[in-house]
Amino acid sequence: MAANREDEVRVRFAPSPTGMLHLGGARTAIYNWAFARACGGDFILRIEDTDPERSTEENTQIILRALRWLGLDWDEGPEIGGAVGPYFQTERMGTYEAALEELKAKGAAYPCFCTKERLDACRQEAEREHGGYAGYDGHCRSIPAEEAASRIAAGEPHVWRLRVPEGHGPIQFDDAVYGPMAFPADVMDDLILVRSDGSPTYNFAVVCDDANMGITHVIRGDDHLSNTPRQILIYEALGFDVPTFAHLPMILGPDGKKLSKRHGATNVEDYRDRGFLPDAMVNYLALLGWSLDGETTVISKETLCHDFSLERISKKDAVFDEEKLTWLDGVHIREMDEGAWLDAAAPWLAYARCLGERVAPGVSVHPSPTKEEQKERIRQLLAPWREVPEEAWQRALASVADERSWHAQVYPLIIERQTTFNELPDKLSYLFWGKNVALDEKSVAKVLKKEDGRAEEALRICRGVLADESIPWDADGLQEECRARGEAAELKPKLLFQPLRVAVCGNQVSPPLFESIVLLPREDVLARIDGVLETIF
Ligand code: GLU
Ligand code: ZN
């Protein structure tokens, strides 16, 4: 079935399930998906699983899961089927056989009996004599049909090659990103279509599938650019319309080299496990090589589905910048309402509880990490609850669900200052310390043991207010009363409140103090202050 290209856009994402979905693959998927949505066309997912050694069912599932997490829904493909399926190449072998038969009948494919030894020798000789190998020399092109047939009948191993027409002019196409391209056909060797074991090569299978599935636009990484002229020769031999090609620029790491594991996580699900929001990922990846108007940085899926166009894809390689992604993630977090935030925060709040409950009994003092160490620790937090014993984990998760309205009060404390979800455990574990306190060493030195010696006095003043049951357990009221009593003792708010912050939250940079205090039971707050008064002064 070939779709009518005038009225319908059909694009595909065609991953090989030989590994996880990496960032480059995700960007390719996003561009195809957004283009289909913006044109009212179809987005097809096809699994290219012809490499039996490296393709696994598990990888296929991981890729589907990652696409679903990103919110990239497909109109045809695995699990939902469609009119031109199946959507796994291993289930389409009959279509490649039929295409090969057609080419044989036209004389456009011929068997090649060359041994690996012969081909290796040709290559070595060409490299020695001419400084490079221009490809297969056409040795078997002119074997008479009867001879070829009897050698095949005798079981001689052979591959099938495309007979590139002699005198073919340059292979030209107008790439939607790179513009007009021309490759001389006479340097194209007769490429292999079907291997000696009967399996199709990538170039052959991809053309058969794209043509049979009515694909109108092939949008893929520019690592495939050199395959395109070969594929065009196959389209021509089969008499198919050639689709429009759009090759995407590379994604580079900050050092200017192709993005790879060396640069840190390149697996999409690692970002999920670090708490990044799928909308932020899609937003960020969409902008790696495409722009809405050259300046807008915050883009919703809706906008993408409305305004994506091939014209605005850049030829320039894009540089992956995790800081920018992190910043964008924060922007998308701030757009979440309380309910959406709670849903996304649930495992992280549960893990904060697990951390909090693990704090040593009483008052303990802990070395202060540097800013860099702290950042690095957060970067490393990848679904950390996997390490929590199952039973404790279930209990922590259940508490977030059961006490949803209590946890909802954490939302206003943190929403303005949060950039990723995996920073919540460190920032919020103090809410779950109970009567214990884990003090940050520097804060002890700078605040509690400050030379002016007024920290203890400040703590005692605040303790008096917090212990006074006639004052409602309300952030503003408590803060006002503390301030008034501090003023009476000539203690400025900063001198008064910093010791309290350290005693209750452990450090000087916690979320808003009194809003935190009122989330805790009075007896826990008093126990923390008393513990600090006893051990530090
Ligand atoms: N399976 C190929 C890949 O993952 C698809 C290439 C294409 O889009 O043509 O690289
Ligand atoms: Zn040969």
Image (cartoon, grey):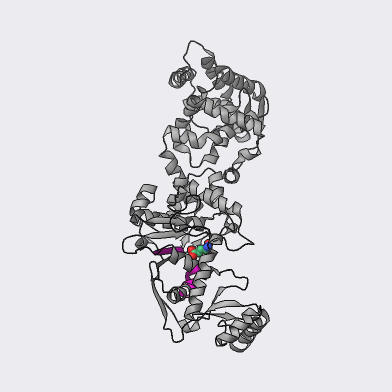
Q: Quadrant of the N terminus?
A: bottom left
Which of 432 and 492 lies nearest the eye of the viewer? 432
Magenta region includes residue 223: yes
In this rendering, the count of numbered labels is: 0
Residue 89 percent across, percent down from the top left: 53, 61
User: Would residue 95 be seen by someone viewing this image from the given angle?
Assistant: yes
Residue placed at 56% from the left, 69% from the top?
Answer: 200
Residue placed at 39% from the left, 51% from the top?
Answer: 297
Q: Residue furthest left?
A: 7
Question: As drawn, is 513 to the left or to the right of 51?
Answer: left
Residue 133 percent across, percent down from the top left: 58, 82
Question: As drawn, is 262 to the left or to the right of 310?
Answer: right
Which of 257 and 307 lies nearest the eye of the viewer? 307
- Answer with the quarter of the image where residue 146 lies: bottom right
In the image, the segment drawn in magenta is 214-229
User: Would residue 300 be seen by someone viewing this image from the given angle?
Assistant: no
Residue placed at 49% from the left, 68% from the top?
Answer: 224
Residue 246 percent across, percent down from the top left: 41, 65
Say if 129 sits above or below 464 in the image.
below
Magenta region includes residue 407: no
Say if 443 sits above or below 101 in the image.
above
Question: As drawn, is 515 to the left or to the right of 125?
Answer: left
- Answer with the quarter of the image where residue 174 lies: bottom left
Say if 429 sits above or below 173 in the image.
above
Residue 312 percent across, percent down from the top left: 36, 61
Which of 392 and 197 lies nearest the eye of the viewer? 197
Q: Quadrant of the C terminus?
A: top right
Question: As drawn, is 442 to the left or to the right of 72?
Answer: right
Which of 62 and 209 lies nearest the eye of the viewer? 209
Say if 368 sits above or below 218 in the image.
above
